[in-house]
Amino acid sequence: MEHLIADIDIIEPTQTAVSCEVKISKDAGLPGKKLYIESYGCQMNFSDSEIVTSILQKEGYSTTDTIENADLVLLNTCSIREKAELTVRKRLIAFNKIKSNNPGMTIGILGCMAERLKAQLLEEEHIVDLVVGPDAYRDLPNLVKNAEEGQKGVNTFLSREETYADISPIRLNSNGVTAFISIMRGCDNMCSFCVVPFTRGRERSRDPQSIISEAQDLFSKGYREVTLLGQNVDSYKWSADENNKARINKLKISEVINFAHLLKLVAQIDPDLRVRFSTSHPKDITDEVLHTIRDFENICKYIHLPAQSGNSRVLALMNRTYNRDWYINRVDAIRRILGEECGISSDMITGFCSETEPDHKDTLSLMDYVQYDFSYMFFYSERPGTLAAKNYPDDIPLEIKKRRLQEIITKQNEISLHRNQLDLGKVFKVLIEGKSKRSDEHLQGRTSSNKVVVFKDDKHMKGQYVTVTINDCTSATLLGDLTE
Ligand code: SAH
Ligand code: SF4
Ligand code: F3S
């Protein structure tokens, strides 16, 4: 799973990100204007690009993966670490050349960097015509039209209600088997290192009926796996009057749908539809959710449970609102209710403000305790405006941050290999996602616990379930044979 373990230079994949960039589908060959969109950052951004494409398709835009042919170029950006923003700045330099050959092209910045920097982006990057934050995409047609008439525009209004519930996303770069469904937006936690609450605004949950309809529609089109997305899925909460939270207490409990209930509703659509979710927050994940996962075969036995650090003092400075013991208690609950085979992964940050060598050792020992299947690992990058930037000096030298990062990466590789070796000889149900990169004779899919399995097969196709016996592995992949 090389792509899942960020090394020092490959820093940008976040929770469920599978690549740093997506170019949208091939030229549709339709008349009218052409849209080219690139996405960076987390899966929420990739999901938003599908909403943006849907909004613009209604305006007559078709998609292209050739930037030179585009009338409208959109970059959906990420601010999570400094490097994420630098990547976008570099991309804009490349766009300069392309635009000089195509002066009619409109260039827009969407997403978290747009929200963080607002009109400043127009001043700093002259090539940019539009700056549009994550809650303002419905205004895109209007902003694009004005830009075409020479009027640059900014809309970074953050909403307390917007969930784009009524918009059917246009799936981009899809394998036709797995898809993401956004179930909530924003984040109300204030982890001190994190820019997301500032770029995505207040947390709000999407109408469950629209989530279920979207999953049903995907299933009817042949999709066999949906991943429910939110920054903190465990705090999903919807009532008939969600926008007036004060009234929730007056409602009967059955009228309020929590995450466990939502999971159940989606799992009941069809036993052949796998359900995944991301991200779980250690402070909020409940035994009720774990029991629901246990009770449905099609809810995948895999939990992304970012720890960030294994040291309680650092966790307090990070404002994660749990300590090491609490985290371990949640992991023990997962093992007790879902068993040893349940996949667990994490996000880790090295070199957070004031982190000492013993604090860092606590992160390594937590990794030993939990036995993560994989982790996304980063060194701390101070973000302007966050609580940490305001209150704590960024005092760990870069070489030390990087050395500690390398140590946790090495540890994770060892643990991932060990976890995979435990699967040798076992039989797993695998959902086929497509051909393997290694050869046309091999297919690849995933186990319920989210491990990639490669096996030789010329009989089945993507979207089908098969059983595979594991006979070899690397730290990244299980290799096996079809079980007759
Ligand atoms: N909502 C998710 C995380 C979203 S951001 C959660 O709470 O777990 C994805 C990951 O990026 C975080 O888990 C964290 O490990 C990392 N990250 C966020 N801000 C960072 C920063 N300032 N420097 C380095 N890594 C950061
Ligand atoms: Fe950021 Fe914390 Fe919210 Fe995750 S839970 S998005 S790390 S503030
Ligand atoms: Fe996601 Fe990056 Fe924004 S991780 S929420 S795109 S800051």
Image (spheres, rainbow, N blue to C red):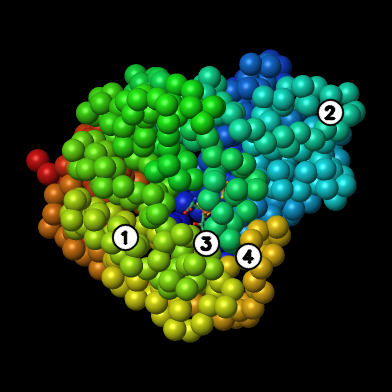
Mark 4 element type: helix
Residue type marked 1? Asp
Is residue 466 shown above or below 220? below
Outermost residue toward the right?
Answer: 150
Badge 1 element? loop
Amino acid type, callout 2: Ala
- Residue that numbered label 3 is attached to: 319
Depth check, mark 2 against mark 3: the one in front is: 3
Residue at horizontal 65%, vertical 46%?
199
Q: Which residue is mark 1?
A: 373
Q: Which residue is found at the position 37% from the left and 52% from the top?
A: 304
**Separation of disc 2 and disc 3 at Cα?**
41 Å
The residue that disc 4 covers is: 388
Mark 4 residue crowding within 10 angstroms, few (<14) / some (14–19) / many (20+) = many
Front position in the image: 230 or 161: 161
- First in sequence: mark 4 vs mark 1: 1
Question: At which x and y percent is residue 116?
Answer: 71, 48
Residue at numbered disc 2? 147
